[in-house]
Amino acid sequence: MENAQIADKNTPYWWEEAPVKPLPRQPLAKKLDVAIIGAGYTGLSAGLVLAREGRSVAAFDAMNPGEGASTRNGGITSGSIRPDYATITRRFGEQKAIAIEAEGKVAREFLYDFIRTEGLDCDFQLVGQFKGVVGYDDYEKTARSAEVLAKRLGIEAYAVPYAEQRNFIGTDFYRGGMARMDIGGLHPAKFHAELLRVALASGLTVHAGTRVTGVEKDGSGFRVVTDAGTVQARQVLVCTNGYTDGAVPFLRRRLVPVRSRIIVTEELAPEVMDRLMPKRMMMIEGRQLGFYYRPTPDGKRILLGGRDSSRAGDPAAPKLFLRRGLVNLFPELENVRLSHTWFGNVAMHRDMLPRIFEKHGVVYATGFCGSGVVWAPWIGMRAAHKLMGHGEQARTAFDFRPPAFIPFYRGNPWFMPAIIQAYRMQDRIALFRARR
């Protein structure tokens, strides 16, 4: 019986209004100033900047542009960083931690201004975000975090005690949380389509369905070998992230593709949405493998996502796991149908910080760890300025050494199901021990 409630469609909900499409075939230029590998948010953002500066630049994508994570994500503009402030300080020093924390605010504000000034029609709404916690001890820590955000960065953030929780979310599962008003939501596929539109209009060439098979040093430049031919490029920028393949083995040994799965409900009655999501905010959890969820831009459905421990095919178990998570939060949705479910890859690595780095003359912009809506355009544009030697415009706290390689790893993440199950066990133990 439970299998009958799996979603009607196994394709992204976002593709209903903004389907990913192939582009007309373009002739390969013999020479380029810059060749970009990847035409998601990062590659298009970098290509837009370079083209507007008069560079001859082309982006190559093995799939249709945006078919990877750029049109499969939840559309939440969190710009979150996985390691906390104390962890970053311990690993990289306090100066780096302060710079990274401050840059998150700047990157979000930049994204919102970019959407507005470029006239990108992507259903962006600055509605704020609620973070729910499972125990009262967690609430105290989260309340202190809100105070730090408000005092140190001037972000409108405040604690939400359990007694006031239903003003933000229609569940009793949490024991309070935190609201911050500098985060919103957008339609990720529309955002990519609009970014592609302005990038093409600015002079970027995008080769869809054109896989790069190798990059070779050639004098002062590079030979970029594709399945459609070879191009000479003065510079190369790699922007592949969760869909990195064997064309860039140095990066492949450092990024681990992890599935993230999303489910979407059928349309819900307005009074149900008013009860469950009264402020139509973006939602996250404080658990190790917590869910992220939100109303769809039209306010008629609930979208919920989380990590998927499967590695092949499209099995039922991860879909049902998310569905049970949805019902645990909102028991009244027990009999609701799901309209869509899908998965996509996010790129994880050992220190979990987005990154710009250079190796053997190739520049990389990558490693967003599930927060690419904010970081991919920001890092992509900073990388473009780095290629052009624009010191101040290229400045970012994320330009430093490459991520560490992962021993015994060559692109097959055989270890991820065990790691995800271990994280889930930690969450169960934490929930059991929580003072609720």
Image: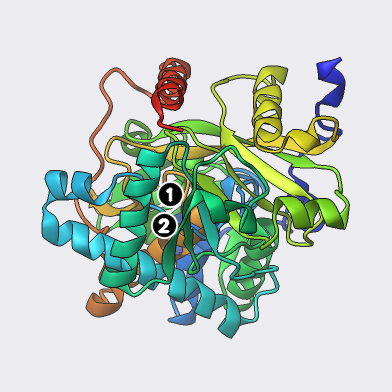
Specify whether residue 246 is in view.
no
Task: Using the image as rendered, state which of residue 218 and residue 398 is in the foreground.
Answer: 398
The residue indicated by pointer 1 is 224
Which quadrant of the rendered structure holds the N terminus? top right
- The residue wearing badge 2 is 232
- Is residue 279 among the parts visible in the rendering? yes
Q: Nearer the viewer, residue 165 or 200?
A: 165
Vertical order, 199 against 249 (above or below): below
**Residue occupying the point 42% across, 24% down:** 423
> How far, Cα to Cα, is label 2 from label 1?
6 Å
Q: Say above or below: 391 vs 374.
A: below
Residue at x-position 49% and y-position 60%: 179
> What residue type is disc 1 on?
Val
Badge 2 element: strand
Between residues 400 and 128, which one lies in front from this camera angle?
128
Q: Helix or strand or loop: what does disc 1 sit on?
A: strand
- Residue 125 x/y as whole percent: 64, 70
Q: Residue furthest bottom?
A: 117
Q: Residue at x 35, y 45 (%)?
A: 82
Q: Circle 1: is it few (<14), some (14-19), or many (20+) Cα within 10 Å?
A: many
Q: Position of residue 249 (x, y in %)?
A: 36, 33
In x, y percent, where is residue 405? 25, 31
Going from the N terminus, do you reach mark 2 or mark 1 first? 1
Q: Position of residue 58 (x, y in %)?
A: 52, 62
Q: Label 2 is placed on what type of residue?
A: Gln
Disc sitting over residue 32 in the figure: none
Q: In the rendered image of this protein, does residue 155 appear above or below residue 13?
A: below
Q: Are marks 2 and 1 in contact (CB under 8 Å)?
A: yes
